Image (cartoon, rainbow, N blue to C red):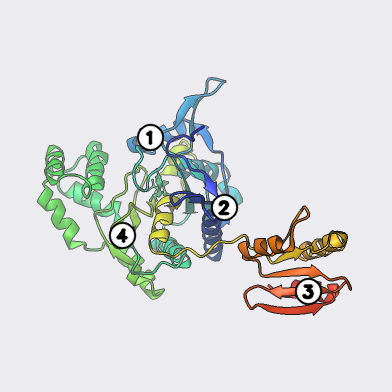
């Protein structure tokens, strides 16, 4: 039976085919995401993968609503698989923000579902690192969040030659819009046209803009000038103080498709422009208020970084480490009479936190050794007739004889 289109199986390495997805690479990615988020003082949260449909129809915007995986459950509730984490998080925060000192800095790694047309970098499920901050209006928080985004990609071995964060501002566009006579009812439609500028034919963009009362050359000039607003200037200077300037540039082509953003917005892209966005986010100071029916008013900002594009980029730039089974010791059983002693040894090593393998049924010694090589184990250990252990380091090809206690001791210390 085939899996559904746009969904993935994850296999342990070595992979069964070139286009298979790696469970090892996924764990590695999640470990790095978690480590860097914790370095920035973010705490982990999670929420339900299935939510009431109206959580998304309220504020996410038409694009995401059009991609919802929704249905009626057996209790005839209108529900949707979560297409993004932000509304869930805003709801959680609105409910319990009083228990947490501000600013609240939280992260999650949810699996998300969008019924999209399948294309490069876009599937019907993906994982996202989400990092969000609540309760602080100052742009220094925007700088901190962008620094986290940059460091997450750096931790994966990517450099300023591989990616760039394109920084923009809904406020800057809002000002542009109002100065030229835009009316509030047309703002979202205008933002949608700007969001699609790079992907749309020029003539079509010009037509859409004209219908809203704007001229394409005027829009293009505003993007070309890329004059940072005061707020963006502060963010840039704080990133510069961290030594992260080479990773950011002002780029008003970015405006973000989602409806709830209010202030600075940003997207990370590969430098060569071969892939879709790696990550995107920004300020959404009104969402908590809307989702809490006006009860809680907390400024907020955050970003989402998807695993699909990022994994494509890491593969293309050969930045993924080699993944093995991570076995420390393969115990070789030359004579079945020594299996009980070997089991005792294996147990002691595992108790000491080492990863241990051995043949569960009788097998020829050369077959057992070959398996140790295949597993890329650090060493083999064989109990000899006199009860000592013959240890072979597979990389160094070094051989030693130790007592069982000495060997367990050495494996307890060594990492
Ligand atoms: P988003 O731009 O829709 O933002 O998604 C963020 C990232 O998730 C994208 O840059 C992309 O890498 C990945 N992504 C999105 N859709 C797909 C897909 N169908 N297949 C593979 N990858 C995908 C949000 O979701 C916001 N909620 C992020 C946010 C958090 N804003 C504030 N806090």
Give the CA distance from mark 3 to mark 2. 30 Å
Residue in view at x 66 percent, y 70 percent: 378
- Of labels 4 and 1, the one closer to you: 1
First-in-chain label (4 vs 1): 1
Front in this rendered view, residue 49 or 349: 349
> Quick one: SS at disc 3?
strand
Question: In the picture, residue 386 is in which quadrant?
Answer: bottom right
Numbered circle sitting on residue 390:
3
Q: Position of residue 387 (x, y in %)?
A: 88, 71
Question: In the picture, residue 237 is in which quadrant?
Answer: bottom left
Is the Cβ of the residue at disc 4 closer than 8 Å to that at disc 3? no
Task: Check disc 2: other Cα within 10 Å, few if <14, some if 14-19, many if 20+.
Answer: some
Task: Check disc 1: other Cα within 10 Å, few if <14, some if 14-19, many if 20+.
Answer: some
Numbered circle sitting on residue 67:
1
First-in-chain label (3 vs 2): 2
- Of labels 3 and 2, the one closer to you: 3
Mark 2 — residue? Answer: 12
């Amino acid at each position: 039976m085939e899996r559904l289109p746009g969904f993935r199986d994850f296999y342990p390495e070595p992979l069964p085919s070139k286009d298979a997805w790696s469970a090892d690479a996924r764990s590695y990615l999640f470990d790095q995401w978690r480590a860097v988020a914790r370095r920035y003082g973010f705490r982990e949260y999670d929420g339900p993968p299935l939510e009431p449909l109206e959580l998304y129809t309220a504020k996410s915007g038409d694009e995401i609503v059009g991609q919802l995986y929704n249905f009626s459950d057996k209790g005839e509730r209108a529900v949707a698989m979560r297409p993004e984490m932000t509304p869930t998080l805003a709801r959680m925060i609105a409910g319990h923000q009083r228990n947490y000192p501000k600013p609240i800095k939280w992260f999650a790694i949810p699996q998300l579902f969008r019924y999209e047309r399948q294309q490069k970098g876009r599937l019907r499920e993906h994982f996202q690192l989400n990092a969000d901050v609540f309760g602080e209006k100052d742009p220094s928080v925007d700088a901190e969040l962008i620094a986290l985004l940059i460091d997450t990609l750096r931790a994966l071995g990517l450099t300023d030659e591989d990616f760039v964060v394109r920084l923009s501002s809904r406020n800057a566009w809002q000002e542009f819009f109002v100065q030229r006579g835009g009316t509030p009812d047309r703002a979202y439609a205008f933002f949608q046209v700007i969001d699609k500028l790079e992907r749309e034919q020029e003539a079509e963009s010009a037509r859409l803009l004209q219908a809203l009362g704007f001229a394409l050359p005027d829009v293009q000039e505003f993007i070309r000038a890329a004059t940072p607003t005061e707020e963006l200037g502060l963010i840039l200077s704080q990133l510069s103080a961290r030594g992260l300037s080479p990773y950011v540039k002002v780029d008003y082509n970015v405006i973000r498709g989602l409806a709830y953003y209010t202030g600075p917005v940003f997207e990370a892209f590969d430098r060569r422009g071969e892939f879709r966005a790696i990550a995107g986010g920004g300020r959404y100071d009104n969402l908590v208020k809307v989702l809490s029916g006006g009860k809680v008013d907390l400024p907020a900002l955050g970003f989402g970084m998807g695993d699909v594009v990022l994994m494509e980029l890491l593969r293309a730039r050969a930045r993924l480490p080699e993944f093995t089974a991570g076995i420390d010791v393969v115990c070789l059983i030359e004579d079945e009479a020594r299996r009980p002693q070997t089991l005792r040894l294996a147990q002691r090593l595992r108790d000491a936190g080492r990863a241990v393998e051995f043949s569960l049924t009788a097998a020829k010694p050369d077959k057992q050794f070959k398996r140790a090589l295949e597993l890329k184990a650090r060493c083999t250990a064989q109990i000899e007739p006199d009860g000592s252990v013959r240890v072979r380091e597979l990389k160094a090809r070094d051989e030693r004889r130790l007592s069982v206690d000495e060997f367990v001791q050495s494996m307890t210390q060594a990492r």
